[in-house]
Amino acid sequence: MIWAVLIVFVAYFISMAAIVYGFKKIASFSSETEKSKTRFSLIIPFRNEAENLQALLESIEKLKYDSELLEIICVNDASEDTSEAIVSEAIQRSRFSIKLIQNKRISHAPKKDAISKAIKNSNFEWIVTTDADCELPKNWLKTLDAFIQKNNPVMVCGPVIYKSNGSFIESFQQLDGLSLQAVTIGSFGLNNPLLSNGANLAYKKEAFSEVDGFSGNEHIASGDDIFLLEKMKKAFPKQVHCLKSKEAIVSTKPQETWGKVINQRIRWASKTSKQKNTASTFLGILVFLVNVSWLAIPFLMVFNSQNLFVYILLLSAKIIADYLVIRQAAVFFSEKIVLWKFLWLPFLYATIVLVVVFGSFGGNYSWKGRSFEKQ
């Protein structure tokens, strides 16, 4: 038993070291003074987002970008609150061109349907997406434009951070989000991108058409970001980039209850289990095994006490490895790690991983007031 645990932990430590190395390889980018050229169609799908849309729209108005180079397409996905009225009001007073269109369900994936319809109604060559519960930094598009001019990509994956009011549940989500951003940026540094986030994602409309959009994964409700990333890097292996810039960090709203946190993770699991990337599958299985081992070790320490020191060493080493990975991301995002909350993270995360895995066996999850079955 101890040898199996040792192998799992050693593989985990090597993987974390690779992520740290990859993260450091990606240079930070700052926007330059050259004149903006890129024309963006910003797509915002929404459903029952009345409490969030106002903040997003206000952050859009603060964007430092030429209004002639940006159009905003808001896609109403059968909202039952005042979301549509909020967008309609913004249309009247915005300095940008804002369109409001209605989504048409043609698949099992309403968000993908919304994005696809918006792209068909777009006028500009670059598509950029965000979520209705996000806020955008003022230099977001300016930085993205400078990056595009310098690197000539077809897809750019940007950084995302969870906002936190300091409560335990929001701190957990922020730390968990930082770990995902570390993996995202680190995997780009290792030339094998594993993750992306639709809250901060840009791609050429022409490239979207060339890979046939979301075709092939419409049966999976979520995954507008990861599955498109997989298609793009296969079709354009040298032109899928990560934008590591403090000026381009999009902030998103955390879940309010633990039930919603679990449900969100089950939804994520529904798409990540369908990824075709071997490294992603390996890392997912490895993380699961490490967390199962983490919960089992306290019992092993009692019933296999002759190896007590080894178990204590493994637990300590994992805490240090996780801290180094998350701290690196936290420094980039200018966030401080509260030690006592971080020390609980491995225990809480391991428990949530097990709950999500067993919860995903049921195959059902809810999203935006709708129920979906895991495909």
Image (tube, rainbow, N blue to C red):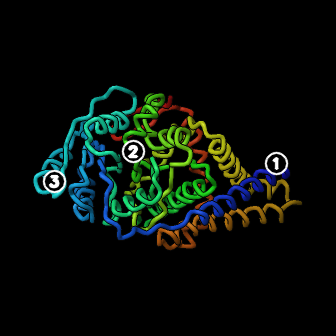
Residue 110 visible in the displayed image: yes
Q: Is residue 30 left or right of residue 134?
A: right
Q: What element carries label 1?
A: helix
User: What residue would you read off at disc 3?
Assistant: 90
Say the numbered circle drawn on residue 4: 1
Residue type at tag 3: Ala
Where residue 170 sits, quadrant-wise, is: bottom left
Residue type at tag 2: Lys
Which of the marked residues, 1 or 3, is nearer the chain's N terminus?
1
Residue appearing at x 64%, y 59% in the figure:
19
Residue 349's place in the image compared with 220, above or below, is: below
**Spot occupied by residue 138 in the image (x, y as percentages of width and height):** 31, 66
Cβ atoms at labels 3 and 2 below 8 Å apart: no
Residue appearing at x 50%, y 46% in the figure:
265
Q: Is residue 223 left or right of residue 279?
A: left
User: What residue would you read off at disc 2?
Assistant: 204
**Spot occupied by residue 32 in the image (x, y as percentages of width and height):** 39, 69
Q: In this view, does 63 lie to the left or right of 357?
A: left
- Count neighbours of disc 2 (C-alpha within 10 A) and say few if under 14, some if 14 to 19, many if 20 or more: some
Which of the marked residues, 3 or 2, is nearer the chain's N terminus?
3
Which of the marked residues, 2 or 1, is nearer the chain's N terminus?
1
Residue 268 visible in the displayed image: no
Q: From the viewer's perspective, is the residue at label 3 or at label 2 nearer?
A: 2
Residue 252's place in the image compared with 194, above or below, is: below
Q: From the viewer's perspective, is the residue at label 2 or at label 1 nearer?
A: 2
Q: Nearer the viewer, residue 211 or 33?
A: 33
**Spot occupied by residue 72 in the image (x, y as percentages of width and height):** 24, 49
